[in-house]
Each structure stands twice: as C-alpha cells, then as structure tokens.
Amino acid sequence: MMPAREPLDPVLVGPVDGIERHDRGATVRLAGELDLFSVPIVRKALLELAAERPGRLVIDLSAVEFIDSTALGALVEAKRQIESAGSRFLLAAPGSHVRRALSISGLDRHLGITDSVEQALEAE
C-alpha cells in the first residue's frame, strides 16, 4: 500500500515540504534553508506529529540546503518528544552540508541517521 500524502496546513509552508503517514509511522520532508526564521514552522510540524505518537518519525533532509543551530535544536527537541512516547526518531538522506553541521555539532553521534528514507523506514 502506498503512503498517503496529505495536503499541508496553510501555516505549514516553506521548510515543511510534505508529511506522509504510513503503517510504520510518519515521514516529514524538509526543504530549503532551516534557520532562525523557518524553525518555528519546522518545530510546530514536528511537535504536532510527535504528539500523535507514530511508531517512528522519519525526517527526510534530502532537500535541505542549509541548517543552523536553531534548526538542529528543533530536531533534538523533536527527538526527545518522540522517544519519550516510545517511538523512533530518524534523520534520512542528509546532504553533505547538513551532514557536516551534524558532525561539527556532535549530533551525528546522538541522532539516528540513514542514507535514505527507505533505510529509515526499514531500520530496526
């Protein structure tokens, strides 16, 4: 069964490019620049999904061009929320710039990161 892609709430525009709910949880596709100005939209979307307690929340970073420390903080906040509900939190397909930011911040050692959304959905 193909996952259903939902139309986005008009408030969730810009950095939140799509939300898909499927039998294993939910996938959020982020895009563009994740920074001080866009992070409130990202945080709202991630925390709303965390409140739904999906089996896993996969963050697709393949279309993210830039990420700053405020956006990294929002990812950490979402991870805490989702894992406190007993669910998995995984980052998928970060590009080289995003991978570098995760590495420099040390978050690559604390966040589950996969090379693709498919790997994140199949990860145990």
Image: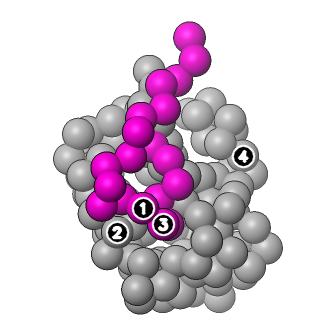
Instruction: Report the side of 100 relative to 39 (left or right).
Output: right
Q: How is the image coloured?
A: one colour
Crowd band around label 4 with a 10 angstrom C-alpha radius: few (<14), some (14–19), many (20+)? some
Q: Between residue 16 and residue 97, name the one nearer to us.
A: 16
Q: Nearer the viewer, mark 2 or mark 4?
A: 2
Disc 3, SS:
loop
Q: Read off the residue under disc 4.
A: 116
Q: Which residues are magenta?
A: 1-19
- Tell me what residue is drawn at x 23 percent, y 39 percent: 52
For badge 3, the amino acid type reads: Gly
Q: Read off the residue under disc 2.
A: 41
Give above or below for 6 relative to 70: above
- Tell me what residue is drawn at x 64 percent, y 80 percent: 66
Q: Between residue 40 and residue 93, name the one nearer to us.
A: 40
Q: CA distance from mark 1 to mark 4?
A: 23 Å
* Residue 10 lies within the magenta run: yes
Most extreme residue toward the front is: 10
Give above or below for 61 relative to 90: below
Quadrant of residue 78 within the rendered picture: bottom left
- How many numbered markers are drawn? 4
Instruction: Report the side of 62 relative to 69 (left or right).
Output: right
Q: Are marks 1 and 3 in contact (CB under 8 Å)?
A: yes
For badge 4, the amino acid type reads: Ser
State which tag comes first along the sequence, 3 or 2: 3
Q: Are marks 3 and 2 in contact (CB under 8 Å)?
A: yes
Q: Are marks 2 and 1 in contact (CB under 8 Å)?
A: yes
From the top left corner, tell me how far across and down residue 108 is, in percent.
61, 71
